[in-house]
Image: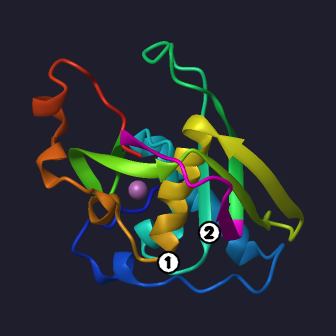
Amino acid sequence: MAVRPVRKMGDPVLLQVAAPVTEFGTPELAELLADMMDTMAAENGAGIAAPQIGVSLQVVIFGVGKNPRYPDAEEVAFTELINPVLTPLTDEQQEGWEGCLSVPGMRGLVPRYTKIRYQGRDRDGGVIDRTVEGFHAIVVQHEVDHLLGKLYPMRIRDLSRFGFSDVLFPGQDLQDD
Ligand code: NI
């Protein structure tokens, strides 16, 4: 287990379409997940995708616990999601401010579907199939985008709504995810 350097926007690995995982329950997969967990915790992120630590595989983790600094933030159960398939369950999109560990210190206003279904596998190959809304749906769309070679700035409709966190939200100690 180790904290790995987070790749930043401009690194080609972040623009690749990640390959699916073909073998489950392996020590290699466990090691990748442990490194992702350590790195996400060290960076205080809400989620991280394998390409962000330089591994072009379809693996994401995410989760948001209770945080006294963000009493209004919805909790999202910690999840390891492999080979995800995402299906929007509505045409409705809502814009919200996002950040990313690969785009440190910045925020942008990004449209996301308000309700989605996601399917995938856990580390042992077990089926994950969930329908979610709200913050949970936003986090999953952001992380799955990393597996498609998409970073949130590519989704911003109005680039005047993209800037530095400390300028946009002075005095707030914002989490990158
Ligand atoms: Ni991100």
Query: Ligand 1 closer than 8 Å to the CB at disc 1?
Result: no
Q: Residue at x 34, y 59 (%)?
A: 152
Q: Report if residue 145 is visible in the image.
A: yes
- Pick the residue in front: 28 or 120: 120
In depth, the one of 25 and 84 nearer the eye is 84
Callout 2 secondary element: strand
Residue at the image point whose x is 83% and y is 57% from the top: 129
Q: Which residue is mark 1?
A: 55
* Magenta segment boundaries in residue numbering: 82-96
Quadrant including the N terminus:
bottom right
Magenta region includes residue 93 = yes
Residue position for label 2: 59
Q: Residue furthest front?
A: 91
Q: Quadrant of residue 57?
A: bottom right
Residue drawn at x 53%, y 82% is: 18
Q: Main secondary structure of the magenta part?
A: strand
Mark 2 Cα within 10 Å, few/some/many (few <14, many 20+)?
many
The answer to whether residue 93 is above or below residue 76 is: below
What color scheme is it? rainbow
Amino acid type, label 2: Val
Which quarter is ligand 1 in? bottom left
- Labels 2 and 1 touching (C-beta < 8 A): yes
Task: Name the mark nearer the viewer: 2 or 1.
Answer: 2
Q: How far across and how far down the image is residue 20, in percent?
A: 66, 84
Q: Position of residue 143 (x, y in %)?
A: 51, 59
Residue 138 image offset from top left, x and y in percent: 52, 46
